[in-house]
Protein backbone atom coordinates (compact mmCIF):
# COMPACT_ATOMS: atom_id res chain seq x y z
CA UNK A 1 0.00 0.00 0.00
CA UNK A 2 1.30 3.44 -0.98
CA UNK A 3 0.46 6.78 0.62
CA UNK A 4 -0.50 9.58 -1.78
CA UNK A 5 -0.94 13.27 -0.97
CA UNK A 6 -2.91 15.11 -3.66
CA UNK A 7 -2.82 18.91 -3.82
CA UNK A 8 -5.59 20.61 -5.80
CA UNK A 9 -6.38 24.29 -6.22
CA UNK A 10 -10.01 23.27 -6.70
CA UNK A 11 -11.63 19.91 -6.02
CA UNK A 12 -14.97 18.55 -4.92
CA UNK A 13 -16.62 15.18 -4.48
CA UNK A 14 -19.80 16.85 -5.76
CA UNK A 15 -18.47 17.42 -9.28
CA UNK A 16 -17.46 14.67 -11.70
CA UNK A 17 -13.92 15.42 -12.92
CA UNK A 18 -10.83 13.54 -14.03
CA UNK A 19 -9.29 14.30 -10.62
CA UNK A 20 -12.23 12.84 -8.72
CA UNK A 21 -11.96 9.66 -10.77
CA UNK A 22 -8.22 9.51 -10.06
CA UNK A 23 -8.35 9.85 -6.27
CA UNK A 24 -11.24 7.40 -6.04
CA UNK A 25 -9.39 4.84 -8.16
CA UNK A 26 -6.25 5.21 -6.04
CA UNK A 27 -8.34 4.45 -2.95
CA UNK A 28 -10.04 1.51 -4.67
CA UNK A 29 -6.58 0.14 -5.53
CA UNK A 30 -5.88 -0.08 -1.79
CA UNK A 31 -3.70 2.99 -1.36
CA UNK A 32 -3.92 5.52 1.47
CA UNK A 33 -5.17 8.75 -0.12
CA UNK A 34 -4.88 12.22 1.42
CA UNK A 35 -6.34 15.21 -0.39
CA UNK A 36 -5.77 18.89 0.32
CA UNK A 37 -7.97 21.05 -1.86
CA UNK A 38 -9.08 24.63 -2.33
CA UNK A 39 -12.76 25.47 -2.51
CA UNK A 40 -14.78 28.67 -2.90
CA UNK A 41 -17.23 27.42 -0.25
CA UNK A 42 -16.87 28.44 3.39
CA UNK A 43 -15.35 25.44 5.15
CA UNK A 44 -13.84 24.61 8.53
CA UNK A 45 -10.20 23.79 7.77
CA UNK A 46 -9.80 22.16 11.18
CA UNK A 47 -11.97 19.22 10.05
CA UNK A 48 -10.88 16.13 8.13
CA UNK A 49 -13.53 14.57 5.91
CA UNK A 50 -13.47 10.85 5.11
CA UNK A 51 -15.10 10.42 1.72
CA UNK A 52 -14.96 7.41 -0.60
CA UNK A 53 -11.96 6.02 1.24
CA UNK A 54 -10.03 9.32 1.04
CA UNK A 55 -8.98 11.68 3.86
CA UNK A 56 -9.80 15.22 2.72
CA UNK A 57 -9.05 18.69 4.08
CA UNK A 58 -10.38 21.84 2.43
CA UNK A 59 -9.03 25.38 2.30
CA UNK A 60 -11.35 28.27 1.47
CA UNK A 61 -10.02 30.40 -1.39
CA UNK A 62 -11.80 33.31 -3.10
CA UNK A 63 -13.77 32.27 -6.17
CA UNK A 64 -11.66 32.81 -9.29
CA UNK A 65 -14.39 32.10 -11.84
CA UNK A 66 -14.82 35.10 -14.11
CA UNK A 67 -12.62 37.40 -12.01
CA UNK A 68 -9.93 39.69 -13.40
CA UNK A 69 -6.22 39.00 -13.87
CA UNK A 70 -5.10 41.00 -10.83
CA UNK A 71 -7.50 39.24 -8.47
CA UNK A 72 -6.48 35.86 -9.84
CA UNK A 73 -2.84 36.73 -9.24
CA UNK A 74 -3.52 37.73 -5.65
CA UNK A 75 -5.44 34.51 -5.02
CA UNK A 76 -2.46 32.52 -6.28
CA UNK A 77 -0.27 34.22 -3.67
CA UNK A 78 -2.64 33.02 -0.95
CA UNK A 79 -2.26 29.36 -1.84
CA UNK A 80 1.15 28.57 -0.36
CA UNK A 81 0.66 29.88 3.20
CA UNK A 82 -2.89 28.53 3.48
CA UNK A 83 -2.02 25.10 2.14
CA UNK A 84 1.06 24.80 4.33
CA UNK A 85 -0.97 25.75 7.39
CA UNK A 86 -3.42 22.88 6.77
CA UNK A 87 -0.64 20.41 5.96
CA UNK A 88 1.03 21.26 9.29
CA UNK A 89 -2.32 20.87 11.02
CA UNK A 90 -3.51 17.57 9.56
CA UNK A 91 -0.89 15.74 7.55
CA UNK A 92 2.51 16.67 8.96
CA UNK A 93 2.82 13.51 11.06
CA UNK A 94 1.72 11.21 8.26
CA UNK A 95 4.05 9.18 6.06
CA UNK A 96 3.78 10.11 2.39
CA UNK A 97 5.31 8.22 -0.55
CA UNK A 98 4.21 10.50 -3.38
CA UNK A 99 2.94 14.08 -3.65
CA UNK A 100 0.72 14.54 -6.71
CA UNK A 101 -0.30 17.95 -8.05
CA UNK A 102 -1.69 19.28 -11.34
CA UNK A 103 -1.14 22.57 -13.10
CA UNK A 104 -2.78 24.99 -12.80
CA UNK A 105 -1.54 26.57 -10.63
CA UNK A 106 2.25 26.80 -10.90
CA UNK A 107 2.36 28.61 -7.55
CA UNK A 108 2.21 25.30 -5.66
CA UNK A 109 5.99 24.96 -6.06
CA UNK A 110 6.79 26.20 -2.55
CA UNK A 111 4.22 23.91 -0.96
CA UNK A 112 5.54 20.87 -2.83
CA UNK A 113 9.18 21.67 -2.03
CA UNK A 114 8.63 22.04 1.72
CA UNK A 115 6.35 19.01 1.99
CA UNK A 116 8.64 16.85 -0.13
CA UNK A 117 11.65 17.71 2.03
CA UNK A 118 9.73 16.90 5.20
CA UNK A 119 8.36 13.58 3.95
CA UNK A 120 11.54 12.67 2.06
CA UNK A 121 9.32 11.56 -0.80
CA UNK A 122 8.85 11.95 -4.55
CA UNK A 123 6.68 14.54 -6.35
CA UNK A 124 4.64 13.95 -9.50
CA UNK A 125 3.45 16.94 -11.53
CA UNK A 126 0.41 16.40 -13.78
CA UNK A 127 1.03 19.04 -16.45
CA UNK A 128 -2.46 20.06 -17.58
CA UNK A 129 -1.61 23.66 -18.41
CA UNK A 130 1.62 25.32 -19.55
CA UNK A 131 1.60 28.71 -17.85
CA UNK A 132 2.49 31.54 -18.38
CA UNK A 133 2.95 30.83 -22.11
CA UNK A 134 -0.75 30.06 -22.57
CA UNK A 135 -1.60 33.48 -21.12
CA UNK A 136 0.88 35.15 -23.47
CA UNK A 137 -0.64 33.29 -26.44
CA UNK A 138 -4.04 34.76 -25.52
CA UNK A 139 -2.51 38.26 -25.18
CA UNK A 140 -3.29 38.31 -21.46
CA UNK A 141 0.30 39.33 -20.76
CA UNK A 142 3.35 40.29 -22.76
CA UNK A 143 6.35 37.98 -22.95
CA UNK A 144 8.55 41.02 -22.30
CA UNK A 145 6.70 42.02 -19.14
CA UNK A 146 8.07 41.66 -15.62
CA UNK A 147 5.07 39.58 -14.54
CA UNK A 148 5.64 37.09 -17.38
CA UNK A 149 9.32 36.73 -16.42
CA UNK A 150 8.36 36.28 -12.77
CA UNK A 151 5.94 33.48 -13.61
CA UNK A 152 8.56 31.86 -15.88
CA UNK A 153 10.85 31.77 -12.85
CA UNK A 154 8.11 30.12 -10.76
CA UNK A 155 7.42 27.67 -13.60
CA UNK A 156 11.06 26.56 -13.71
CA UNK A 157 11.08 26.25 -9.92
CA UNK A 158 8.04 23.98 -10.06
CA UNK A 159 9.59 21.73 -12.73
CA UNK A 160 12.84 21.46 -10.79
CA UNK A 161 10.91 20.49 -7.63
CA UNK A 162 9.15 17.49 -9.20
CA UNK A 163 10.92 14.25 -10.14
CA UNK A 164 8.23 13.36 -12.66
CA UNK A 165 6.35 15.61 -15.10
CA UNK A 166 3.37 13.89 -16.69
CA UNK A 167 2.29 15.43 -20.02
CA UNK A 168 -1.14 15.00 -21.61
CA UNK A 169 0.10 13.86 -25.01
CA UNK A 170 3.17 13.23 -27.13
CA UNK A 171 2.98 16.78 -28.50
CA UNK A 172 3.17 18.09 -24.94
CA UNK A 173 6.27 15.99 -24.30
CA UNK A 174 7.96 17.30 -27.46
CA UNK A 175 7.04 20.89 -26.59
CA UNK A 176 8.56 20.54 -23.14
CA UNK A 177 11.72 18.95 -24.52
CA UNK A 178 12.15 21.88 -26.91
CA UNK A 179 11.37 24.70 -24.49
CA UNK A 180 12.52 23.14 -21.20
CA UNK A 181 15.33 20.75 -22.22
CA UNK A 182 16.82 20.70 -18.71
CA UNK A 183 13.84 18.62 -17.57
CA UNK A 184 13.67 16.19 -20.50
CA UNK A 185 14.55 13.16 -18.36
CA UNK A 186 11.54 13.86 -16.10
CA UNK A 187 8.93 13.79 -18.85
CA UNK A 188 6.44 11.06 -19.71
CA UNK A 189 2.94 10.85 -21.19
CA UNK A 190 0.33 11.00 -18.43
CA UNK A 191 -2.94 11.41 -20.36
CA UNK A 192 -6.26 12.64 -19.06
CA UNK A 193 -8.20 9.57 -17.94
CA UNK A 194 -11.63 8.69 -16.58
CA UNK A 195 -13.44 5.91 -14.84
CA UNK A 196 -15.10 3.98 -17.67
CA UNK A 197 -18.86 3.88 -17.25
CA UNK A 198 -21.00 0.88 -18.14
CA UNK A 199 -23.05 2.02 -21.12
CA UNK A 200 -25.99 -0.04 -19.84
CA UNK A 201 -26.27 2.36 -16.90
CA UNK A 202 -25.87 5.55 -18.90
CA UNK A 203 -28.93 7.72 -19.56
CA UNK A 204 -30.67 6.52 -22.72
CA UNK A 205 -31.02 8.65 -25.86
CA UNK A 206 -34.27 10.58 -25.99
CA UNK A 207 -34.81 10.74 -22.22
CA UNK A 208 -35.43 14.31 -21.11
CA UNK A 209 -34.98 15.52 -17.56
CA UNK A 210 -36.64 18.91 -17.56
CA UNK A 211 -38.65 21.39 -19.57
CA UNK A 212 -35.48 23.36 -20.39
CA UNK A 213 -33.79 20.33 -21.91
CA UNK A 214 -36.93 19.27 -23.74
CA UNK A 215 -37.57 22.69 -25.26
CA UNK A 216 -33.98 22.96 -26.46
CA UNK A 217 -34.00 19.50 -27.97
CA UNK A 218 -37.29 20.11 -29.74
CA UNK A 219 -35.83 23.20 -31.38
CA UNK A 220 -33.80 20.87 -33.56
CA UNK A 221 -35.89 18.34 -35.43
CA UNK A 222 -34.69 14.77 -35.75
CA UNK A 223 -33.64 15.23 -39.37
CA UNK A 224 -30.91 17.68 -38.31
CA UNK A 225 -27.38 16.84 -37.23
CA UNK A 226 -27.04 18.19 -33.70
CA UNK A 227 -23.69 19.59 -32.54
CA UNK A 228 -22.88 20.45 -28.92
CA UNK A 229 -20.26 22.56 -27.15
CA UNK A 230 -20.31 22.32 -23.38
CA UNK A 231 -18.22 23.45 -20.42
CA UNK A 232 -16.28 26.59 -19.63
CA UNK A 233 -16.92 29.28 -22.23
CA UNK A 234 -13.79 31.39 -22.27
CA UNK A 235 -11.30 32.96 -24.65
CA UNK A 236 -9.33 29.71 -25.16
CA UNK A 237 -12.40 28.03 -26.70
CA UNK A 238 -12.39 30.15 -29.91
CA UNK A 239 -16.10 30.87 -29.52
CA UNK A 240 -15.91 33.95 -31.73
CA UNK A 241 -14.67 31.73 -34.56
CA UNK A 242 -17.29 29.05 -33.87
CA UNK A 243 -20.05 31.66 -33.97
CA UNK A 244 -18.63 33.11 -37.19
CA UNK A 245 -19.00 29.63 -38.68
CA UNK A 246 -22.50 29.14 -37.32
CA UNK A 247 -23.47 32.55 -38.68
CA UNK A 248 -22.01 31.78 -42.11
CA UNK A 249 -24.02 28.55 -42.31
CA UNK A 250 -27.17 30.37 -41.24
CA UNK A 251 -26.69 33.08 -43.88
CA UNK A 252 -26.24 30.40 -46.54
CA UNK A 253 -29.56 28.91 -45.51
CA UNK A 254 -27.92 25.61 -44.57
CA UNK A 255 -30.47 24.21 -42.14
CA UNK A 256 -29.23 20.64 -41.57
CA UNK A 257 -26.77 21.50 -38.76
CA UNK A 258 -27.99 22.71 -35.37
CA UNK A 259 -25.68 23.90 -32.57
CA UNK A 260 -26.25 23.86 -28.80
CA UNK A 261 -23.79 25.84 -26.66
CA UNK A 262 -23.95 25.21 -22.91
CA UNK A 263 -21.89 26.69 -20.10
CA UNK A 264 -20.66 29.65 -18.13
CA UNK A 265 -17.55 31.77 -18.41
CA UNK A 266 -16.14 35.06 -19.60
CA UNK A 267 -17.47 34.54 -23.15
CA UNK A 268 -20.93 33.33 -22.15
CA UNK A 269 -22.61 36.72 -22.51
CA UNK A 270 -20.91 37.20 -25.87
CA UNK A 271 -22.33 33.89 -27.07
CA UNK A 272 -25.84 34.69 -25.86
CA UNK A 273 -25.77 38.18 -27.36
CA UNK A 274 -24.60 37.06 -30.80
CA UNK A 275 -27.19 34.31 -31.10
CA UNK A 276 -29.92 36.77 -30.10
CA UNK A 277 -28.72 39.84 -32.00
CA UNK A 278 -28.03 37.96 -35.25
CA UNK A 279 -31.25 35.96 -34.83
CA UNK A 280 -29.40 32.74 -35.57
CA UNK A 281 -31.95 30.05 -36.31
CA UNK A 282 -29.41 27.23 -36.19
CA UNK A 283 -28.13 27.71 -32.62
CA UNK A 284 -29.24 27.93 -29.01
CA UNK A 285 -27.39 29.00 -25.87
CA UNK A 286 -28.08 27.55 -22.41
CA UNK A 287 -26.37 29.13 -19.43
CA UNK A 288 -26.26 26.14 -17.13
CA UNK A 289 -27.49 22.60 -16.69
CA UNK A 290 -27.06 20.29 -13.73
CA UNK A 291 -24.72 17.36 -14.32
CA UNK A 292 -27.56 14.87 -14.86
CA UNK A 293 -29.38 17.21 -17.24
CA UNK A 294 -26.20 17.85 -19.21
CA UNK A 295 -25.56 14.12 -19.53
CA UNK A 296 -29.06 13.58 -20.90
CA UNK A 297 -28.70 16.53 -23.24
CA UNK A 298 -25.44 15.03 -24.51
CA UNK A 299 -27.24 11.74 -25.21
CA UNK A 300 -29.50 13.59 -27.66
CA UNK A 301 -26.65 15.15 -29.64
CA UNK A 302 -24.94 13.71 -32.71
CA UNK A 303 -21.49 15.36 -32.60
CA UNK A 304 -19.38 16.87 -29.81
CA UNK A 305 -17.24 19.92 -30.65
CA UNK A 306 -13.81 20.59 -29.13
CA UNK A 307 -12.55 24.09 -29.86
CA UNK A 308 -9.31 25.94 -29.15
CA UNK A 309 -8.03 29.37 -30.12
CA UNK A 310 -5.82 29.38 -33.21
CA UNK A 311 -3.23 31.59 -31.44
CA UNK A 312 -2.01 28.87 -29.10
CA UNK A 313 1.65 27.92 -29.43
CA UNK A 314 1.34 25.28 -26.71
CA UNK A 315 -0.34 21.90 -27.41
CA UNK A 316 -3.48 21.87 -25.27
CA UNK A 317 -5.46 18.65 -24.92
CA UNK A 318 -8.97 19.31 -23.52
CA UNK A 319 -10.41 16.64 -21.20
CA UNK A 320 -13.82 17.26 -22.81
CA UNK A 321 -12.65 14.68 -25.35
CA UNK A 322 -13.24 11.97 -22.74
CA UNK A 323 -16.86 12.99 -22.12
CA UNK A 324 -17.66 12.63 -25.81
CA UNK A 325 -15.84 9.30 -26.09
CA UNK A 326 -17.57 8.03 -22.96
CA UNK A 327 -20.92 8.69 -24.64
CA UNK A 328 -19.82 7.22 -28.00
CA UNK A 329 -20.16 10.61 -29.68
CA UNK A 330 -18.12 11.42 -32.79
CA UNK A 331 -15.98 14.52 -32.38
CA UNK A 332 -15.32 17.65 -34.41
CA UNK A 333 -12.01 19.21 -33.33
CA UNK A 334 -11.82 22.91 -34.22
CA UNK A 335 -8.39 23.83 -32.90
CA UNK A 336 -4.97 25.35 -33.48
CA UNK A 337 -2.45 23.37 -35.50
CA UNK A 338 -0.01 22.88 -32.63
CA UNK A 339 -2.07 20.47 -30.54
CA UNK A 340 -2.10 16.81 -31.57
CA UNK A 341 -5.71 16.26 -30.47
CA UNK A 342 -6.83 16.49 -34.09
CA UNK A 343 -4.39 13.72 -35.02
CA UNK A 344 -5.63 11.54 -32.16
CA UNK A 345 -9.23 11.99 -33.30
CA UNK A 346 -8.73 11.55 -37.06
CA UNK A 347 -5.75 9.15 -37.25
CA UNK A 348 -5.37 7.23 -33.99
CA UNK A 349 -8.94 6.79 -32.77
CA UNK A 350 -10.58 7.47 -36.16
CA UNK A 351 -13.57 8.85 -34.33
CA UNK A 352 -14.17 12.24 -35.89
CA UNK A 353 -13.07 15.28 -37.87
CA UNK A 354 -10.58 18.14 -37.64
CA UNK A 355 -10.58 21.66 -39.02
CA UNK A 356 -8.27 24.56 -38.04
CA UNK A 357 -9.81 27.31 -35.92
CA UNK A 358 -8.58 30.01 -38.31
CA UNK A 359 -10.10 28.54 -41.48
CA UNK A 360 -13.73 29.65 -41.77
CA UNK A 361 -14.40 28.06 -45.19
CA UNK A 362 -12.84 24.88 -43.84
CA UNK A 363 -15.18 24.87 -40.84
CA UNK A 364 -18.24 25.39 -43.04
CA UNK A 365 -17.09 22.66 -45.44
CA UNK A 366 -16.43 20.20 -42.59
CA UNK A 367 -19.83 20.77 -40.97
CA UNK A 368 -21.52 20.13 -44.33
CA UNK A 369 -19.39 17.02 -44.84
CA UNK A 370 -20.44 15.68 -41.42
CA UNK A 371 -24.09 16.27 -42.25
CA UNK A 372 -23.67 14.52 -45.59
CA UNK A 373 -22.03 11.54 -43.85
CA UNK A 374 -24.59 11.37 -41.04
CA UNK A 375 -25.02 7.60 -41.40
CA UNK A 376 -21.35 7.10 -40.51
CA UNK A 377 -21.55 8.95 -37.18
CA UNK A 378 -22.51 5.95 -34.99
CA UNK A 379 -19.49 4.03 -36.33
CA UNK A 380 -17.17 6.92 -35.43
CA UNK A 381 -18.72 7.15 -31.99
CA UNK A 382 -18.14 3.47 -31.27
CA UNK A 383 -14.50 3.78 -32.35
CA UNK A 384 -14.05 6.66 -29.93
CA UNK A 385 -15.40 4.68 -27.01
CA UNK A 386 -13.17 1.70 -27.87
CA UNK A 387 -10.16 4.05 -27.96
CA UNK A 388 -11.18 5.49 -24.58
CA UNK A 389 -11.29 2.05 -22.98
CA UNK A 390 -7.87 1.12 -24.37
CA UNK A 391 -6.02 4.40 -23.75
CA UNK A 392 -7.81 6.63 -21.24
CA UNK A 393 -8.92 4.33 -18.41
CA UNK A 394 -8.11 5.89 -15.02
CA UNK A 395 -6.52 2.59 -13.95
CA UNK A 396 -3.65 3.45 -16.32
CA UNK A 397 -3.02 6.69 -14.39
CA UNK A 398 -2.93 4.85 -11.07
CA UNK A 399 -0.38 2.45 -12.53
CA UNK A 400 1.86 5.35 -13.59
CA UNK A 401 1.76 6.84 -10.09
CA UNK A 402 2.57 3.47 -8.59
CA UNK A 403 5.53 3.10 -10.93
CA UNK A 404 6.81 6.55 -9.98
CA UNK A 405 7.16 5.38 -6.38
CA UNK A 406 9.34 2.46 -7.41
CA UNK A 407 11.67 4.28 -9.80
Image: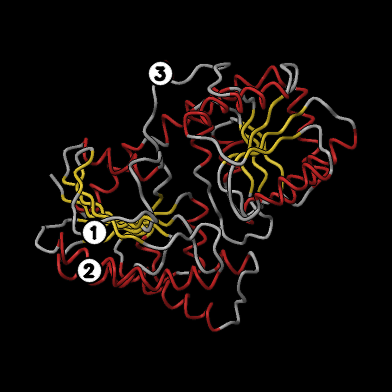
Image side of residue 167 versus residue 93, left or right: right
Q: Are marks 2 and 1 in contact (CB under 8 Å)?
A: yes
Q: Of residues 85 and 22, which is closer to you in this image?
A: 85
Q: Of residues 403 and 208, which is closer to you in this image?
A: 208
Which residue is identified by label 2? Answer: 85
Q: For the residue labelled by badge 3, is the local secondary structure a helix, a strand or a loop?
A: helix
Q: Is residue 132 above or below residue 330?
A: below
Numbered badge on residue 179: none
Classify 10 Å Cα crowding around label 3: few (below 14), some (14-19), many (20 and above): few
Image side of residue 333 versus residue 24, left or right: right
If the image is split into quadrants, where does the C terminus sit? bottom left
Numbered badge on residue 45: 1
Which residue is identified by label 3? Answer: 201
How many marks the image carries: the answer is 3
Q: Where residue 54 sits in the image (x, y, percent)?
A: 21, 44
Q: Where residue 128 sits in the image (x, y, percent)?
A: 45, 55
Looking at the image, which residue is at 52% across and 80% down?
147
Q: Closer to the N terminus: mark 1 or mark 3?
A: 1
Amino acid sequence: MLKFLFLFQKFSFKESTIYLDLVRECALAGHEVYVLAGTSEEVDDTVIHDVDGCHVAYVTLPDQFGCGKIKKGLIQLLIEPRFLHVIYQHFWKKEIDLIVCPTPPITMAGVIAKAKKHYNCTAYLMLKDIFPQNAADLKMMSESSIIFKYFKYIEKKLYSTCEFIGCMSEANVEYMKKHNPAFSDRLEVFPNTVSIKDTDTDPQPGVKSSASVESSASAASKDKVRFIIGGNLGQPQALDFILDGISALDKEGFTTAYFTIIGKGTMAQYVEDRIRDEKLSNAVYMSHLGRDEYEKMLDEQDVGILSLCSEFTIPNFPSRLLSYMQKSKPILAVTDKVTDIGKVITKDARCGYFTPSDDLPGFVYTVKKICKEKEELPVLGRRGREFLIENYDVKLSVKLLEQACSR
